[in-house]
Amino acid sequence: LIAMPSHSWSPWRPLAGMPALDAAVLAETLDGGQAFRWHRVADEDAWLGIWADHVAQLRLDARGSVEWRAPEKMAGRVAAALPRYFGLDRDFAAHVDALPWRCDPHLARCVAEFRGLRILRQPFGETLLGFLCSATKQLVQIKQMVALLAARHGTQIAPGHFQLPTWPTLAEVPEAELRRCLLGFRARYIAETAKFLAAHPGWLEETETLPYAAAKERLCSLPGVGEKVADCVLLFGAGKLEAFPVDVWIL
């Protein structure tokens, strides 16, 4: 839970094109392990999230429709960014229907209980940073590391809210300083990746546009990136639905 900084918010408005959800599905979408910057808002039945230079708050109305608001000064660009972030250009109902749930009772139960669950389309570079923090850590710890990176090395984009540092910024941060964000051994991977990306401008942007197999091969060449992290980055940051992250729980 977090407390809300005091600043002017836009009015609540519906997120057009988003299907009605129940609270458990919204929570699983925002806080189920594909994103690390959403938090329940103290004393409100709502969620607050940050991606790129956007801050938004989400809630469900009495019918389960998703509503959003943002700090007044960025409401226009948040409105423009939300459809891409939530993949509203994709027919997730059709994708789900194409899964073999008719012959898989466990999958059928999952589909029924989490109707409307969707895959987010997060900024590619931020997704890579988040999943480099994820090795052998639980969700609450990953969120803490990411929050510290933003607060100590990112840019304040609204009162009390910080954008994650860019990879060029991270390339200038000593590894010892990164370790103060509770990264442990992950600090070395992030420092080395940042230096590589600084020496190869445009590499990440190009990787995001490549076909799945080629993009995965490139990501796996980065320090600390194995198949699971690469698949997470490609699925949650590049919208490549071919990616299927396999962790110890899936195994």
Image (tube, grey):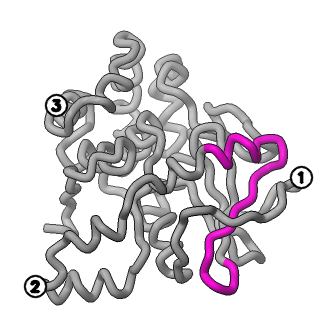
Horizontal side, residue 93 vs residue 179: left or right: left
At label 1, the amino acid type is: Ser
**Residue 153 vertical placement versus 201 (above, below):** below
Q: Secondary structure at mark 1?
A: loop
Near-viewer residue (119 or 99): 99
Please report contact status of discs 2 and 1: CB closer than 8 Å, yes or no.
no
Task: Report the residue at 40% width, 13% height from top.
Answer: 201
Q: CA distance from mark 1 to mark 3?
A: 45 Å
Whether the magenta-drawn stretch holds residue 192 is answered as no
Please report contact status of discs 3 and 2: CB closer than 8 Å, yes or no.
no
Residue 1: x and y in percent read 66, 69
Q: CA distance from mark 2 to mark 1?
A: 51 Å
Horizontal side, residue 106 vs residue 166: left or right: left
Residue carrying label 3: 214
**Closer to the N terminus: mark 3 or mark 2?**
2
Question: How many neighbours does mark 3 have within 10 angstroms: few (below 14), some (14-19), or many (20 or more)?
Answer: few
Task: Report the residue at 28% width, 65% height from top.
Answer: 95
At label 3, the amino acid type is: Ala
Q: Residue furthest left?
A: 103
**Closer to the N terminus: mark 2 or mark 1?**
1
Q: Which residues are magenta?
A: 61-80
Residue carrying label 1: 8
Near-viewer residue (71 or 182): 71
- Label ID, residue 103: 2
Q: CA distance from mark 3 to mark 2?
A: 32 Å
